[in-house]
Image (spheres, grey):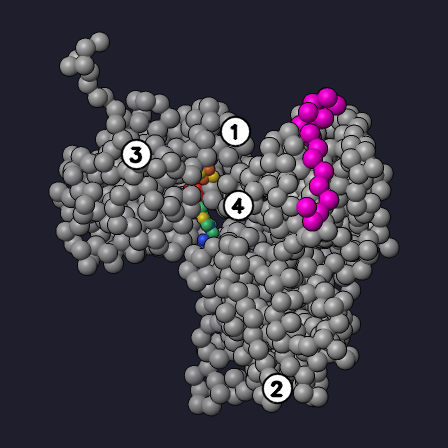
Amino acid sequence: MNHDVFMAGFGGQGVLLIGNLLAYATILEGNNASYFPAYGVEKRGGAANCTVVMSDGAVGSPVVGEPEAALLMNPAAMEQFYPRVRKGGMALLNSSLIEDDGSSRSDLTLVRIPANEMALEIGDSRLVNMVMLGGYVEYSRVVARDALKEALKEVLPERNHRFLPMNHNALEAGAAFVREALA
Amino acid sequence: MTKRLFVKGNEAVAMGALEAGCRYYFGYPITPQSDIPEYISREMPALGGEFIQAESEIASINMLLGASACGARAMTSSSSPGISLKQEGISYMAGSECPGLIVNISRSGPGLGGIDASQADYFQATKGGGHGGYHIIVLAPASVQEMYDLTMHAFDLSDRYRVPAMILADAVIGQMKEALDPHPYKAPADLPPKDWALTGSGTREVNKVVKSLYLGVGELEQHNLKLHRKYAQMQEQEVRCEGYELEDAQLVVTAYGSTARIAHTAVRIARREGYKVGLLRPITLFPFPKQAYRDHTANGQKVLCVELNTGQMVDDVRLAVPQAEVDFYGRAPGAGSLPTPEEIFAQIRLHCEVH
Amino acid sequence: MKTEEMKQVFARPQALNPVQTHFCPGCQHGVIHRLVAQAMDAFDIQGQTIGVASVGCSVFLYGYFGIDVIEAPHGRAPAVATGAKRVHPRRPVFTYQGDGDLAAIGTSEILHTANRGEPITVIFVNNTTYGMTGGQMAPTTLPSQKTSTSPYGRDESKDGYPIKMTEILAGLEGTAYAARVAVDTPQRVIQAGKAIKKAFQTQVEDNRFAFVEVLSTCPTNWGMNPLEANARVAEEMIPYFPLGVFKDVSA
Ligand SMILES: Cc1ncc(C[n+]2csc(CCOP(=O)(O)OP(=O)(O)O)c2C)c(N)n1
Ligand code: SF4
C-alpha cells in the first residue's frame, strides 16, 4: 500500500487538522504515514496546506510533486494545485467555494462536493474539513472510518468529546456523497 | 511494546534528549526549531533539570560548555544563523574536549536567508565550522524515529570520544510528523567515566582543568594530533550509512536527511520503471562513510549526489571515490525549492538506462 | 460644506510608502512606523535618512519607508548604524528594534553604542515577547506572564526580571535623550510622536544619541483580540514600565 494526498485551503478550514487525523489513523492501523505541513511565513499568509503520505512499508518522500489525490477547499488552492494532480488520480473539490468545474482536465477522477452546504446541514460550518476527509477515505479506502473516529477521539481534548457525533456524521456524509458520485 | 506516538521531528529530538538523561538545555528562539525549547521548557521542570532561554546563541553555547565541563549531559539547539554564532563556542568545546549536543534544524541562507529547509550548512558542520582545524561528530537523521534514536546516539558518541556532536536536520525532518516508537534509553555499558569533569577540587590532590590554551613548545601540536587520532578512530568504528536497492544498481543515488527521503521515493519509482538504481544514505556525515562509496562503485557504477544546496557533500563523495563518475543535482535552498521525487526521477533517467 | 472650508487634517506621512503592511490586526508596529515617518517629515530628512532594520516583525522596514535601509543581523543594528553614521556623519541614521533584538541578543551593541554617544536615533519596540518567532519569552516578558518558552509563567528566580532598557541607557553618559512612551490612547500617541520627534531632533540638531522605548502590542502571541491587547498596555505594562522622559540633556 502506497498512497499520498495533498490538502489545501485557507487557515481556519481545518486543513491541517484532517491531515493530522488521516496520518494518525493510518498509524493506529499499524501502517506508516508522514504528515508535512506548510509552516511559518506561509502560515501567516492565510493559506494552509499539507501532504500526507501513507504506506505499509517505508514512507519515502514526505513531499510529492504530483499527488495521487488532492482535497482542494478554496479557489486559490484550486488554481494553484489542480494542475498538479497526478494523471489517473483524484481531485475532490469543495464546490461550495470553487466555481471552476474542473473541466480543464479529463485525465483524473473528479468529484465536486458542496462541503460547506453539507457541513451547515449537519449542524456546524466548521465541519467542512470532515466532510472532505470522509469523501477522500471513501475513495481511497486507505483507512477505515472507524480508525479515523478513534484518532479523532484521541486528538480532541476530552471536553470537546460532545462534538464527536457531529464529526462522525460529517465523515459519513462525505463518504456517502462520494460513494454516490462514483457509483 | 510501547505505543507508537505521532509527533514532530523536533519533538522527537527533545524526547530523545530527555530520555537519554539530558537535564540541561540552553537555547535561544529561532524558526524552525523552536518546538525543541518549547517542548523542553514544558517537560524539564518535572524532571528536575534546568532550562535556560539565554540572551543569545553565544551565551547558550557557552552555558553548554560550562555544564559539559562539569560532567553533565547537556545540549543546545538552534538553526543556521544561530549556529553560526555558536561557532566560537563550538571551537572552544572541541579544543577543550567537551562533549555536548548541538542540534541544527538548518534553514536557508546566507545571512537571514529564509526559514525553508536547507542543506547548505553541510560544510560548516562537517569541516569544523569555527577556527582551528577540528571536527565534530555530525549525524543526519532522515525520519522522526531517527531524530529520537540519533539524538540518544549522539550523546553516547560525544561522551565516548569527548567530541561535541551535532544533529544536522532541516525543516522537513523537524516539522513533519510521523510514527515514533519511544523506546527507553540504555546507556552503553562501556562508556568511560567522566573523571575529567570538574567537581570543585577541594577533596583531591590535583585540580582539574578544562581548557584549550596550550602554550608550551610542542604542546598544542600534540593536542591537535590527539584530536585527529580520535577522528581517525571514529572513521574506523563509528561510520553509519544505509543502502536501498543497491545490489545490482548501476547508478548509486546518494543523499542524506530530507533529500534522502525524497530520493528514496524517486528510486522506488525508477525501479518500477526498470532502472537499475539504488540509494546510499550517509547517516554519519562526520565520520563520512567513504568505504561504502568505494564498495558500491567498485564495478564502475556511477554516482548521482542530490542535495538541497549548490553542491557540498558531493565534494566528499568525489574525494572518497576519485575514480568514479560522480554527478550532482541540487537546488539552491529557499521558498519553493524543495525538489520532488518526480524531479529526482527525471535526473535518474538522464544518468541511467532501462535494462 | 463648501470646499474652501475643507481642510485636510490627516494624511499619510511623506516618508511612509502607500502600501499595506503585513502586521497582524491590532499590532502597534504600524502606528509606530507612522510616528517615525512623521518625525522624518517634520525635519524634512526623508531624502537623507538611513534606516537600519532589525530582525523581528519589523524586518520589512525597507518596504514601508521611502528611505535607504540596511538589514542588520539579529541584535547588531546599533553596530551597523555606527558604521553607516561614521561614513555619512551628516546623514540621519536610526535603528528600529524589537525587545528580543535590542534587549536580549543585542544588549552589548546597544549599550556600547549609547556609551560612545553615537549620534543616532534608536526606536525600541517593547511588546514583552518575541513576535516573529511565535511568542517566546523576551527579556521584557512580565513576571508570571506565560509564553511558549515560559509555559508556567516567567519565574523571576530563574528567568530574571523584565529589563528596563530606558532606565539603564539613561544612566550612561553618552545618552542625550531617553524616554518611554505608549500608543494605546490618542493622547499617548501624540506624546509618543513628540518623543520620537525629539529623538530625531537630538541627532539632527545636537548630533547626540537618543533612545525612545515604545510599549506595543502583540495580540497574536498574547492570545488576545486587538482591544484586549490594547487594554493590557495600560493595565499590565505601564505599571511595570513607567512612561516618561528619563533623560534629556537639552532640558
Ligand atoms: C542569530 C539569530 N537568532 C535568532 C533568530 C530568530 N529570530 C528572528 S526574529 C527574532 C526576535 C523577534 O522578537 P523581537 O525582537 O522582540 O521583535 P518582534 O518580532 O516582537 O517585533 C528572533 C529570535 C535570528 N533571526 N537570528
Ligand atoms: S506577531 Fe505580534 S509583533 Fe508581529 S506583527 Fe503580529 S502582532 Fe505584531
- The residue labelled by disc 3 is C34
Let me know if marks 3 and 1 both belong to one chain.
Answer: yes
Q: In which image quadrant can residue C47 be found?
A: top left
Let me know if marks 3 and 4 both belong to one chain.
Answer: no
Q: Are marks 1 and 2 in contact (CB under 8 Å)?
A: no
* Chain for disc number 3: C
- Horizontal relation, residue A17 to residue C81: left or right: right
- Decide which of B283, B272 is in the foreground and name it: B272
Mark 4 lies on a secondary structure that is helix
| Extreme residue toward the left, this view | C205
Query: Depth-wise, is mark 3 or mark 4 nearer the camera?
Result: 4
- The residue labelled by disc 4 is A42
- Per the rendered image, the range of residues in magenta is A106-123
Query: Depth-wise, is mark 4 or mark 2 nearer the camera?
Result: 2
Under mark 1, the amino acid is Met
Mark 3 lies on a secondary structure that is helix
- Horizontal relation, residue B343 to residue C83: left or right: right
Mark 2 lies on a secondary structure that is loop
Under mark 2, the amino acid is Ala
* Chain for disc number 4: A
Q: State whether residue C79 appears in this view.
A: yes
Q: Which mark is residue C224?
A: 1
Q: Position of residue C177 (x, y in %)?
A: 23, 40
| Image quarter hosting the C terminus of chain B | bottom right
| Crowd around label 4: few <14 · some 14–19 · many ≥20 (10 Å) | few
